[in-house]
């Protein structure tokens, strides 16, 4: 038996012209909203990046200067705003989406907010970053940090404590450096530091967060990128701009609905065009003969 749209109730609803028109209008409104929020968020971080450059004090600040100025700036903002919003419960649609603009206003995500905002700010300054999920008491994700890619290697940054570590040669230390010599680097932490954050280990992506899908994706990355690059890959860094991601998803849905609208119009009003024996074209099943006879009578 041949299945058609009319024989499947769900498809009859989906491809109904009123449903398609409503969904297209709704998706257009969502596209406009996501574009507006994305532009707003981009402008916020652009202004923050300009502020960091101005604070650097030179016309051509070094990479390390930009990184440290960004770290200090985000820590200052977090300490100010978390004290205001930390004990307040905000129930709204925007808080459920949890974009970076929400983190930027409230810092309710604690170390996660610090890490996400710092990472996005450094990206705005054209510095590559990755989100580091620290292992605390045997469990990953107990504390969230940022690693920035410098000319001499990665540098670990803890926005929650305004903390970075210096190696003996004066350069900034990576997570691996601190992990390998924690007893030495421990002397550099501030007085209010949580002693549970001992740099036991790190992961950059939770490959078990979505069963089946994430492990399969990890195998694909292993195949194309290799083991080391896959293990150091931070997917969270790629997903920081949520409104841009939503915008692209909605565009896909809108295109699907637009095709559905074209299909409905074609099914209802479209008439196939065929060529006759004289080489000219006519609309199939059109009442041409009757129309011609009326002309002859006139």
Image: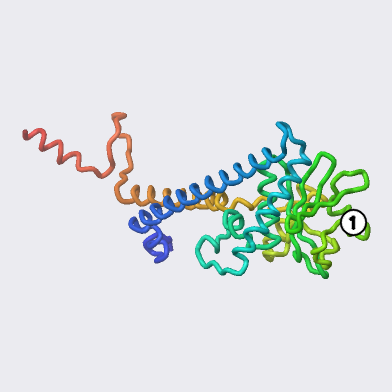
Please give the name of the residue rendered at 68% of the width and 38% of the height, measured from the top-left corner. Answer: 53
Q: How many numbered marks does the figure carry?
A: 1
Residue 236 seen in render: no
Residue 76 appears in the rendering: yes
Foreground pick, 15 / 53: 53
Q: Which of 279 and 222 is in front in this view?
A: 222
Left of 101 or right of it: where is 154?
right
Where residue 148 sits in the image (x, y, percent)? 76, 47
Placement of 230 over or under 126, stated as above or below: below
Which image quadrant for residue 59?
top right
Q: Residue 289 appears at what percent x and percent y?
A: 17, 39
Q: Is residue 230 left or right of residue 102?
A: right
Give me the residue at 43% from left, 48% from top. Answer: 259
Label 1: how many Cα within 10 Å (few below 14, some 14–19, many 20+): some
Q: In which quarter of the image is residue 277?
A: top left
Determine the secondary structure under disc 1: helix
Query: Compared to 261, does 2 lie above or below?
Result: below
**Which quadrant holds the C terminus?**
top left
Name the spot of residue 183 as percent of width and height, x first: 93, 60
Colour theme: rainbow
Quadrant occupied by the N terminus:
bottom left
Residue 254 or 81: which is nearer the viewer?
Answer: 81
Residue at image position (69%, 64%) is 209
Q: Classify residue 213 by image quadrant.
A: bottom right
In this view, the residue farthest toward the left is 298
Q: In this view, does 192 lie to the left or right of 9?
A: right
The image position of residue 129, as x and y in percent, is: 73, 47
Q: Name the residue under label 1.
A: 185
Foreground residue, 192 or 130? 192
């Amino acid at each position: 038996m041949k299945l058609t749209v009319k024989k499947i109730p769900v498809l009859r609803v989906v491809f109904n012209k009123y449903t398609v028109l409503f969904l297209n209008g709704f998706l257009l409104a969502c596209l406009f909203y996501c574009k507006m929020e994305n532009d707003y968020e981009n402008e916020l971080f652009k202004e923050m990046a300009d502020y960091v450059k101005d604070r650097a004090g030179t016309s051509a600040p070094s990479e390390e200067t930009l990184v440290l100025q960004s770290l200090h700036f985000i820590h200052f903002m977090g300490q100010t705003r978390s004290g205001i919003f930390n004990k307040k419960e905000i129930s709204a649609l925007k808080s459920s989406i949890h974009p970076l603009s929400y983190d930027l206003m409230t810092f309710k995500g604690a170390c996660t907010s610090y890490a996400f905002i710092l990472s996005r700010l450094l990206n705005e300054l054209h510095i590559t970053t990755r989100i580091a999920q620290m292992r605390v008491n045997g469990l990953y994700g107990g504390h969230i940090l940022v690693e920035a890619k410098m000319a001499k290697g990665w540098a670990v940054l803890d926005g929650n404590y305004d903390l970075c570590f210096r190696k003996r040669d004066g350069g900034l230390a990576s997570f691996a450096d601190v992990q390998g010599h924690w007893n030495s680097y421990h002397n550099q932490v501030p007085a209010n530091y949580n002693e549970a954050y001992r740099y036991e280990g790190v992961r950059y992506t939770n490959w078990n967060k979505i069963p089946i899908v994430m492990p399969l994706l990890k195998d694909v990355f292993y195949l194309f990128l290799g083991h080391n690059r896959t293990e150091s890959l931070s997917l969270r860094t790629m997903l920081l701009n949520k409104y841009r991601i939503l915008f692209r998803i909605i565009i896909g849905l809108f295109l699907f609905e637009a095709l559905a609208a074209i299909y409905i119009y074609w099914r209802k009003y479209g008439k196939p065009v065929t060529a006759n024996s004289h080489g000219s074209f006519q609309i199939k099943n059109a009442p041409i003969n009757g129309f011609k006879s009326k002309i002859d009578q006139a």
